[in-house]
Amino acid sequence: MQWTQIYDPLGHWWLSTLVAALPIIVLFGLLAGLKVRPHWCAIAGASTAVAVAIIFFKMPPTLAALSFGYGVAFGVLKIAWIVLAAVYLYDISVETGQFEIMKESVAGITADRRLQVLLVAFCFGAFIEGAAGFGAPVAIAGAFMIGLGFKPFHAAALNLIANTAPVAWGAIGTPVHALAAVTALPESDLNAMIGRILPFTAIIVPFWLVRTMVNWRDTFEVFPAIAVVGVSFALTQFFWSNYVDSNLVDIMGGVVSLAAVLIFLRFWKPKKIWRFDYDDKPAAPPPPAAPIADDMGGEWPAEKFDGLVKVHTYTAGQVFKAWTPFAILSLFVLLWGLPKIKLAMNQATTPAFKVVLANGKVRPGPPGWDVPYLHNAISRAAPVVTKPTPEAARYDFNWLSATGTGCFFAAIVSGFLLGLGPLQLMKIFWRTLVRMRLAMIAISFMLGLGYVTRYSGLDAVLGLAFTRTGWLYPFFGTFLGWLGVALTGSDTSSNALFGSLQRITSQQLGIDPILMCAANSAGGVMGKMVDAQSITIATAATEQVGNEGIIFRFVVWHSVALGSIVGIIVLLYAYVFKWAVPHGLTFVK
């Protein structure tokens, strides 16, 4: 069975675009408007996508069903497995009491909520994003902040906002690798261009994060710390992406910014300690000279704050032991990301990893099994591609080299080192699985939706609508990446969906394709906070399932505003700073 995608089945581009957008309208309408649980929203959105593809775009039902199943299988192994394993490691840390020591070690650095959100949500979250990605930082850092005393809503919302600037290099640079693969553009140039867009947002986001929770006066009171976090992360992000590689950008950025702010806080303290109004307050009222509490929280003179919060004192050895699970996680993820190790594991354990054709040559294209009846059965056509191009559908069951497996092994090793036995580890894993079951369903169906959108051509119809914006395309093309992440929950998937379209459209409009393909990834990071997958993970990790719609409505305007800032930066590169778009770069070896 062969089928070629149709991009204007109704004869009017605007009407075809409206119909193609129905799955998105259903998904976000149910989530934000009717407050339906995310897994049901994902199921409804995926069902709508299948129906639209079959009824309006004439996609054969068999191909639609296979596309959906392919997406679900991808979501389970490539994304849900990572999140589950990362949360499992966190649960082990909680079960052994080490997480309590981690919390106290952070609380001992500062009791100020503004500084805690910078340390945990931004710096630590960026490190986890670089190591595991795919929602893991929202889950782990969100739970961490609840342990520090943040309300679940604040923990979820603030982490969703924080998990933006690092996303383009999540999971050892996976989005950049995918972007280079689908666009056939030099990865070093794409990586460098993303590293010339997002450092500006890396400076803005920490300020935005603090301003979200406090007023302007209280924000500027800790501006020195905000500047240290943002500038140190941005400089590291720029340097590593432009001169080293795409694998460790976030990990190094998170480590450097965390170290920089910790050193800075040894010499600088805010004049007032800011706390939420629901935090434990002193038995006696603050001195008359203290500022009046605002509607979210209160302040006390720093010198009067000693003793208001009980912080235990632990030895350096105890603190080191408490952070060991996350050090082990970093080590395993780094090892799993090394090409030689990954290749060796794949060749030893992954079925159909290498297929030799009849002529003796290795089959080109992505590794894995050809998905029966789907592989090369669907072709993209002009104007999305220059000539009819079959869509590959190969599933590499890389169960051992998958990032989630590395995270899982890190959890097991950590559990043994912390004194847990096999039976205890099994019980903890079962509890984690039960707690995350709905999040995993939502993730799987969201990827099913994304793959139906891709193979039916709905993504191309939506993308072609953006190409009609003319000279403003650099701005709206950036939002094409935003749309891709909002749909799929993954910057990697967004790059796979729209990377090729970005290259073709930019070339037709006379805009540098390096810039627009990089803009797809850079713009996509701001869509991360509104995708149903991330919101589901956030609510599952912070024990507030049922509040997804409230959180979505809170973060959506932050997402659009920050996405607009990225779009303006891309516009400036397109027309003002053309010379800053890189070409012919090579990484330092």
Image: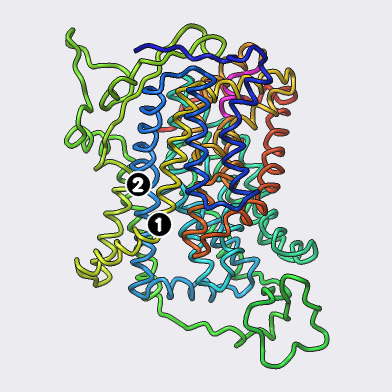
The answer to whether residue 36 is left or right of residue 377 is right
Rendered-image quadrant of the N terminus: top left
Measured from the top left, where is residue 262 in percent x and y? 55, 65
Image mark for residue 241:
none
Measured from the top left, where is residue 58 in percent x and y? 49, 17
**Amino acid on which disc 1 is placed:** Met
Regarding mark 2 in the picture, which secondary structure is present there? Answer: helix
Q: Can you tell which of label 1 and label 2 is closer to the viewer? A: 1
Closer-to-camera residue (377/504): 377
SS assignment for the magenta stretch, majority: helix
Residue at numbered disc 1: 436
Mark 2 surroundings within 10 Å by alpha-carbon count, few (fewer than 14), some (14 through 19), many (20 or more): many
Regarding mark 1 in the picture, which secondary structure is present there? Answer: helix
**Amino acid on which disc 2 is placed:** Leu
Span colored in magenta:
511-518
Q: Is residue 80 above or below residue 450?
A: below
Mark with earlier residue (1, 2): 2
Quadrant for residue 411, please give it.
bottom left
Residue at numbered disc 2: 334
